[in-house]
Amino acid sequence: MRAKRGAEDKRQGNARWARGAARIGLRWAGAAAALSAVALGAAALLAPLGGCGAGGGQIGESFGPGITLESVAGLVLFATTRDFNSEIYYVNANSEEHEQNRVTLAIFSSETDPCWSPDGTQIAFVSNRTGNPEIWRMNADGTNPMKLTDDRAEDLEPAWSPDGTRIAFKSNRDHELYEIYTMSAIDGSDVRRITNNEQSDNSPSWSPDGTRLVVSRVTLVGATGEDSYGDLVIVDASGNGNEVQLTQHQPGEVAQHPCWGVHNGEEWIVYAYRPSAAEDTDIYRMRPDGTDITRLTTDGARNSQPCFSPDGSKIAFQKFRRGSFDIYVMDFDGSNEQVLAESEEADTAPAWSPVPVQQGE
């Protein structure tokens, strides 16, 4: 009887996880979610509101502690809860010591989802310092933050276009589930809705030429959501409705967190795949036409949120072990796996600097 009850508890737990995960676009929150919720409440009461800056954006207090960056080449941004609330750090993937430094310093709010501008001078990210998750941008050293979105809904997962003019993001501003939007990277104006369907679209990543986006589309199935599934879909960045579905997954299977990059002159998409709600995720790669699917991690851990280095030779990702997420890096073929950043708390959402490392750096 005890074994049967335990199995039923696990089944119900998986069902609850699936419902919640599908609702938020299958973001691996873990302990960070609880801490972010606490920080969100504190931010709503205590975070100061900035004034309106030029171009319609909202200027706030400086996020950064005044770090000095001689070069951003080789830096990998990530979000971490090691300071209780979620903050943005970087780790130097180009050094043996893997030096780390804090980029944001906003005590009563949480900063997540970091993303580099294509020239490496700015960072887009999500902050709840004004009461709910909005997209901001700041200088690479954490100074001069500007609020780009201002909506009662959740605006998450910013992705800077290759030409630097626009930022793609997901939002539930038009209905309960997420859709993909783009906006001006300068001041958040000219918001355009890119997708419009009854599924939840997440984790936009630009094609190298900036004309398309690959997203993770989650289809909700059943009352519990346990059999929901996620596929990778390429959409036209103009929002004209042209789409190409790359995967055809069955209920319970989920492809998520795609990243579009170039390796040796060829385009590839790296992503996380979960066979069922009861199993862990691994990192895979494929060509943008859906062929040559290759599994890169096989250790049975929860590996997710991969991103390419500028030349595509390496992949940073997050791995769940020791009860929390850490940041790892591996070669293009999945070999030579190493730890980049680890702590007792959650280190998540790696984003590799687009500036290539020069010989001698």
Image: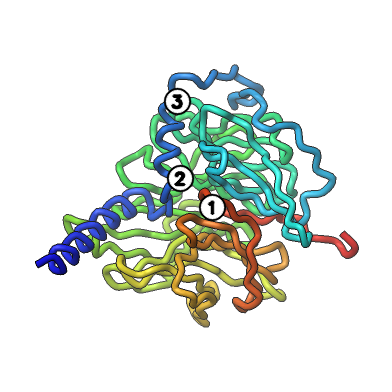
Q: Residue at x 71, y 32 (%)?
A: 65
For badge 2, the amino acid type reads Ala
Quadrant showing the C terminus: bottom right
Q: Are marks 1 and 2 in contact (CB under 8 Å)?
A: yes
For badge 3, the amino acid type reads Ala
x%, y% of residue 213? 52, 58
Q: Secondary structure at mark 1?
A: strand
Which residue position is annotated with label 1?
A: 348
10 Å crowding of disc 1: few (<14), some (14-19), many (20+): many
Marks 1 and 2, Cα distance to the nearest angstrom?
9 Å
Which residue position is annotated with label 3?
A: 42
10 Å crowding of disc 3: few (<14), some (14-19), many (20+): some
Residue 160 seen in render: no
**Residue 112 position (above or below residue 27):** above
Q: Secondary structure at mark 2?
A: helix
Please tell me in which quadrant of the rendered image residue 328 appears: bottom right
For badge 1, the amino acid type reads Thr
Quadrant showing the N terminus: bottom left
**Residue 348 position (above or below residue 153):** below
Q: Residue at x 32, y 49 (%)?
A: 23
x%, y% of residue 182? 52, 45
**Relative to 126, 160 lies left or right:** right
x%, y% of residue 189? 55, 33
Q: Secondary structure at mark 3?
A: helix
Which label is found at residue 32? 2
Q: Along the line of sight, which residue is nearer the eye, 324 or 29?
A: 324
